[in-house]
């Protein structure tokens, strides 16, 4: 059975768990309804935080041919909302609710050339893609970017497997990726129009690639990406959101999203992906005291600069230049 986007829930029992980098834990599950996971697939787990059921989505790093072993890798950020802590606390023998593999980042087989760009824990979405491209003899390059080698999961394994098809850029070694140089080399390549670039990583890296891809006139459909909406331009901070028409004013804490805060305050919100991709959670900004940290990939650059709408599932208020104690206040309306 192929992966799809319908949520089919099952149980997954932990059969292996170990650390593969600083704050990144590899967890192998044995699902009750096994389905082989294709490259680019992810799954959603249900977790209980403060007495309420919540969900988190993770890329599938690897899958056995029969789908009886599914490997995830979970990064515990400083500002985790609790899900990463719970996942890191899982032990062999524990069981959690999870979906079968779902697909919204498919690898298209048949391109003349591929460039895979992984930033930090974004490598989890690329491991399986790179392995498949190697196995089918595709023309590909894997670019792996990280702060330091200790924080780069699977670095040694990937280097051994992909050899000279892999390039590594490490900030702490003074070898940061020059995005424009990389995209320039793609634009000058004989297969430029047939090159597909797949990327997953921090928003700064992905935004830089998107801008450079456009400035070099590369084919827009050939740029593909995965985002779980978990990084932004600024460190997360508390901010206030108001909906005057509904009489709602609430504080969005560091560990919550605006969508979650509004739901808790009684607002009936529309949403779907919770990753800043579908735009269904769009809200209209009426007034703004501070800045918006747009973390979505739904709105265009111009729409984000206009600051008249935002995806409340991932985007946040920010006030990086304000005096201590000053919080951003966002006044908005919802459909």
Image: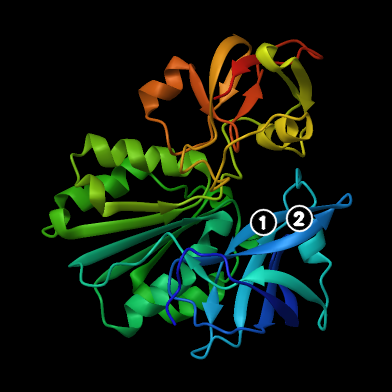
Crowd rating for badge 1 (residues with CA inside 10 Å; few <14, some 14–19, many 20+): some
Q: Residue at x 56, y 10 (%)?
A: 286
The circle drawn on residue 83 is 2
* Relative side of 321 to 223, left or right: right
Residue farthest toward the left in the current orientation of the protein: 190
Please tell me how many numbered marks the rendered image carries: 2
Residue farthest toward the right in the current orientation of the protein: 51
Seen in the picture, residue 213 relative to 60 is either above or below; the reply is above
Residue 243: x, y in percent?
Answer: 67, 16
- The tag earlier along the polypeptide, 2 or 1, is 1
Crowd rating for badge 2 (residues with CA inside 10 Å; few <14, some 14–19, many 20+): some
The answer to whether any part of residue 237 appears in the image is: yes
The answer to whether any part of residue 329 appears in the image is: no
* Relative side of 295 to 237, left or right: left
Seen in the picture, residue 206 relative to 53 is either above or below; the reply is above
* Secondary structure at numbered mark 1: strand
* Relative side of 335 to 258, left or right: left
Seen in the picture, residue 114 relative to 32 is either above or below; the reply is above
Contact? badges 2 and 1 (CB < 8 Å): yes
Quarter where residue 10 is shown: bottom right
Which one is in front, 88 or 285? 285
Q: Check the picture and name the quadrant holding the N terminus.
A: bottom left
Q: Check the picture and name the quadrant holding the C terminus.
A: top right
Q: Residue at x 38, y 27 (%)?
A: 301
Quarter where residue 235 is shown: top right
Q: Residue at x 22, y 65 (%)?
A: 113
Seen in the picture, residue 289 relative to 219 is either above or below; the reply is above
Q: Residue at x 80, y 51 (%)?
A: 82
Residue 41: x, y in percent?
Answer: 48, 67
* Secondary structure at numbered mark 2: helix
The circle drawn on residue 56 is 1
């Amino acid at each position: 059975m192929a992966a799809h986007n319908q949520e089919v829930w099952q149980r997954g029992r932990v059969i292996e768990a170990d650390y593969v980098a600083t704050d990144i834990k590899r967890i192998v599950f044995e699902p009750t309804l096994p389905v082989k996971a294709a490259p680019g697939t992810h799954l959603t787990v249900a977790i209980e935080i403060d007495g309420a059921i919540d969900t988190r989505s993770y890329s599938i790093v690897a899958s056995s041919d029969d789908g009886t072993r599914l490997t995830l890798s979970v990064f515990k950020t400083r500002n985790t909302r609790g899900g990463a802590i719970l996942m890191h606390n899982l032990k062999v023998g524990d069981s959690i609710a999870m979906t079968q593999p779902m697909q919204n980042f498919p690898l298209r087989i048949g391109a003349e050339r591929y460039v895979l760009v992984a930033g930090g824990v974004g490598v989890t979405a690329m491991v399986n893609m790179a392995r498949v491209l190697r196995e089918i003899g595709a023309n590909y390059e894997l670019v792996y970017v990280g702060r330091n080698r200790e924080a780069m999961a699977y670095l040694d394994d990937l280097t051994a497997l992909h050899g000279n098809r892999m390039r590594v850029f490490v900030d702490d070694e003074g070898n940061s990726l020059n995005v424009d140089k990389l995209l320039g080399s793609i634009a000058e390549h004989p297969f430029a129009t047939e090159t597909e670039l797949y990327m997953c990583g921090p928003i700064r890296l992905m935004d830089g690639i998107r801008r450079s891809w456009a400035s070099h006139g590369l084919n827009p459909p050939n740029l593909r990406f995965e985002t779980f909406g978990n990084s932004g331009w600024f460190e997360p901070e508390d901010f206030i959101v108001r909906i005057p028409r509904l009489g709602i004013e609430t504080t969005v804490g560091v560990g919550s999203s605006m969508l979650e805060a509004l739901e808790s305050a009684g607002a009936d919100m529309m949403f779907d992906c919770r990753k800043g991709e579908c735009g269904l959670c769009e809200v209209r900004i009426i007034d703004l005291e501070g800045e918006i940290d747009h973390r979505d990939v739904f709105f265009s650059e111009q729409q984000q600069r206009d600051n008249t709408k935002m995806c409340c599932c991932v985007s946040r208020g920010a006030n990086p230049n304000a005096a201590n104690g000053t919080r951003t206040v966002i006044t908005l309306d919802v459909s």
